[in-house]
Amino acid sequence: MSYSVVPVAEVHLEGLHHALDVVARERRYLAFTQAPALETSLAFYRNIIAGDLCQFVALEGRTVVGWCDILPTHGEARSHVGHLGIGLIPTARHKGLGARLLEATIAKAHTKGLTRIELAVRTDNTNAKALYMRFGFLVEAVQQRSVRIDGEYHDVYAMALLL
Ligand SMILES: CC(C)(COP(=O)(O)OP(=O)(O)OC[C@H]1O[C@@H](n2cnc3c(N)ncnc32)[C@H](O)[C@@H]1OP(=O)(O)O)[C@@H](O)C(=O)NCCC(=O)NCCS
């Protein structure tokens, strides 16, 4: 089955919610430990589509296996800043899809006039951090005990890319 990376569309939304749920339930990569309720997710994604915001999905055939988004932060003074999130279900990792998703999403963010992309990644998420570094993201800070899952704290890198 071949892989593709395309802008998010209505037809992807249930699959996108499922992919988010799969990654969230791994309990080690995302702030979520499960996806929000389907209706909540659908409203969130439809807002992205309606606003032509930066979100791409990775597909295996027609099945959504991952996503990347760079979404606006609040406030006029922060209108040049986007926050990046990315995830692939386990079987879709290590195939270059993370890089393809980042490339597409960052390119769109650039055309939208964003000049700073921020993200947060756990310090033990070496795969994701290496990918971000390859794209030019720099570590700006270590946020101690930023995440707590099952009673265990984890530190997080605050990273940013200037466009
Ligand atoms: C972070 C994440 C999106 C990275 O995606 P990815 O596709 O695995 O990343 P890459 O595209 O960089 O590929 C990673 C590895 O696959 C290798 N690779 C790249 N293209 C490849 C290809 N066509 N065939 C085989 N391997 C390939 C890369 O060389 C790299 O190898 P390395 O880890 O030994 O250096 C993915 O691991 C993921 O979803 N993780 C869980 C969620 C998560 O961490 N989200 C981020 C939270 S901040």
Image (spheres, helix red, strand yellow):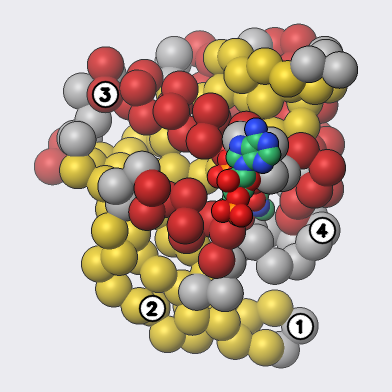
Q: Is residue 9 left or right of residue 103?
A: right
Under circle 1, the secondary element is loop
Quarter of the view holding residue 1? top right
CA–CA distance in space, label 4 to label 1: 12 Å
Reading the chain from its start, which is encountered first: label 4 or label 2?
4
Q: Amino acid at mark 2?
A: Gln
Q: Amino acid at mark 1?
A: Asp
Amino acid, disc 4: Arg
- In the rendered view, tell whether residue 142 sits above or below residue 79: below
What label does residue 143 carry, if any? 2
Write the residue at 58% across / 66% down: 125
Residue 121 badge: none
Image disc number at residue 110: 3
Residue named by callout 1: 150
Q: Which residue is mark 4?
A: 25
> Mark 3 or mark 1, which has the lower sequence index?
3
Which is nearer the eye, 5 or 29? 5
Residues tagged 3 and 1 counted as in contact (Cβ below 8 A): no
Residue 162 picture location, percent across and down:
19, 43
Q: Position of residue 49 (x, y in %)?
A: 54, 15
Please rate how many residues cluster around mark 1, counting C-alpha atoms within 10 Å: few if below 14, some from 14 to 19, many from 20: few
The amino acid beneath tag 3 is: His
Q: Respond yes or no on whether mark 2 lies under 8 Å from ligand 1.
A: no
Badge 2: residue crowd in 10 Å (few <14, some 14–19, many ≥20): some
In primary-sequence order, the first of circles 4 and 3 is 4
